[in-house]
Image: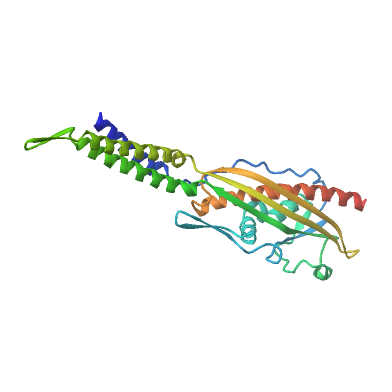
């Protein structure tokens, strides 16, 4: 019975060692691409010149937290935006608008600072010029995978200590004859076994958070202003805000590797792209009505 108990303790320690490791994010929930409804233009009536997302608007301060001796860093809002713009959804925004005859993609050729003065000097081939100003783009991360190793090590330590006390307790005889004397070791034997059981219970309690699946909760906030400039009247005729607020769960640990972070960025790239395309769909309808 005691051998079985010791074997069980060893097995539990092995389980803790294996399952307490964090795992990567392998996939995010599916996001259906927005289908533009008003794409019946004969040709694009706008020129898309890209995103205004700079460090004058977005903070460059990253968030750092300590977890069991490791420093974990969440990108600054500015760096988050730069990473998200590298996803297919936002990198191809201009081509998507162009393929739908809403706006010609000129984002690759515009290097101005998106001011009214710069727009007046811009040689547009369409009447309207549009760009997106990034007023806010930030996610915060709550990753339980950062504590799994800590709970695993702590649990394995308690179980290891319990195993050692149980082995010592099992090795102590109930009674021991030395010369003319017989010593009663039952008290010390029970003491060792009691400590062993106590440590084992503590280790098993630590097992619960250690074997829980890695999970990341992300809170995202974004605010994007779409500007439309009229090259004839020389004024901004539309400034429409797109606001996004989302709390999302990802299976796996954000801090596990760069691939996990990339999946999070791709997910938010799709969310942002859908919201912007939906707004451009509305703007296109307004411009078509305005020109008639």
Residue 136's x, y, as percent? Answer: 71, 57
Residue 31's x, y, as percent? Answer: 65, 42
- Disc count in the image? 0
Task: Give left or right: position of 130 versus 88.
Answer: right
Look at the image and tell me in which quarter the N terminus lies.
top left
Residue found at the far left of this picture: 179
Residue 103 vs residue 147, the one in the foreground:
147
Residue found at the far right of this picture: 292
Q: Image quarter for residue 107? A: bottom right
Up the image or down, 256 lies above or below 196; here it is below
Residue 218 vs residue 161, the one in the foreground:
161
Residue 144's x, y, as percent? Answer: 51, 46
Up the image or down, 264 lies above or below 60; here it is above
Residue ID at (38%, 40%): 203
Residue ID at (67%, 66%): 55
Residue ID at (43%, 48%): 150
Up the image or down, 100 lies above or below 194; here it is below
Residue found at the far front of this picture: 180
Residue 178 vs residue 23, the one in the foreground:
178
- Asked whether residue 44 is in view, the answer is no
Residue 151's x, y, as percent? Answer: 43, 45
- Asked whether residue 141 is in view, the answer is yes
Residue ID at (27%, 31%): 4
């Amino acid at each position: 019975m005691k051998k079985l108990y010791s074997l069980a303790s060893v097995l539990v320690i092995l389980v803790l060692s294996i399952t307490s490791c964090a795992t990567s994010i392998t996939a995010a929930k599916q996001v259906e691409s927005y289908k533009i409804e008003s794409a019946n233009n004969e040709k694009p009536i706008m020129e898309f010149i890209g995103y205004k997302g700079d460090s004058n608007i977005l903070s460059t301060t990253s968030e750092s937290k300590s977890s069991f001796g490791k420093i974990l860093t969440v990108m600054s809002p500015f760096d988050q935006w730069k990473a998200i713009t590298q996803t297919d959804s936002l990198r191809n925004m201009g081509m998507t608008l162009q393929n739908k005859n809403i706006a010609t993609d000129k984002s690759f050729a515009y290097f101005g600072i998106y001011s009214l003065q710069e727009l007046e000097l811009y040689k547009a081939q369409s009447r309207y010029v549009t760009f997106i100003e990034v007023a806010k783009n930030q996610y915060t991360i709550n990753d339980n995978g950062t504590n799994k190793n800590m709970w695993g090590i702590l649990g394995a330590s308690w179980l290891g200590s319990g195993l050692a006390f149980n082995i010592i307790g099992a090795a102590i005889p109930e009674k021991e004859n030395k010369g003319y004397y017989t010593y009663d070791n039952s008290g010390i034997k029970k003491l060792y076994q009691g400590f062993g059981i106590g440590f084992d219970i503590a280790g098993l309690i630590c097992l619960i958070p250690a074997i829980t699946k890695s999970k990341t909760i992300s809170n995202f906030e974004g605010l994007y202003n779409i500007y439309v400039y009229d090259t004839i009247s020389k004024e901004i005729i539309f400034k429409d805000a797109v606001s996004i607020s989302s709390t999302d769960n990802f299976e796996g640990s954000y801090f596990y590797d760069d691939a996990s972070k990339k999946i999070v960025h791709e997910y938010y790239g799709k969310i942002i792209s859908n919201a912007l395309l939906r707004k451009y769909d509305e703007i296109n309808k307004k411009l078509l009505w305005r020109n008639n």
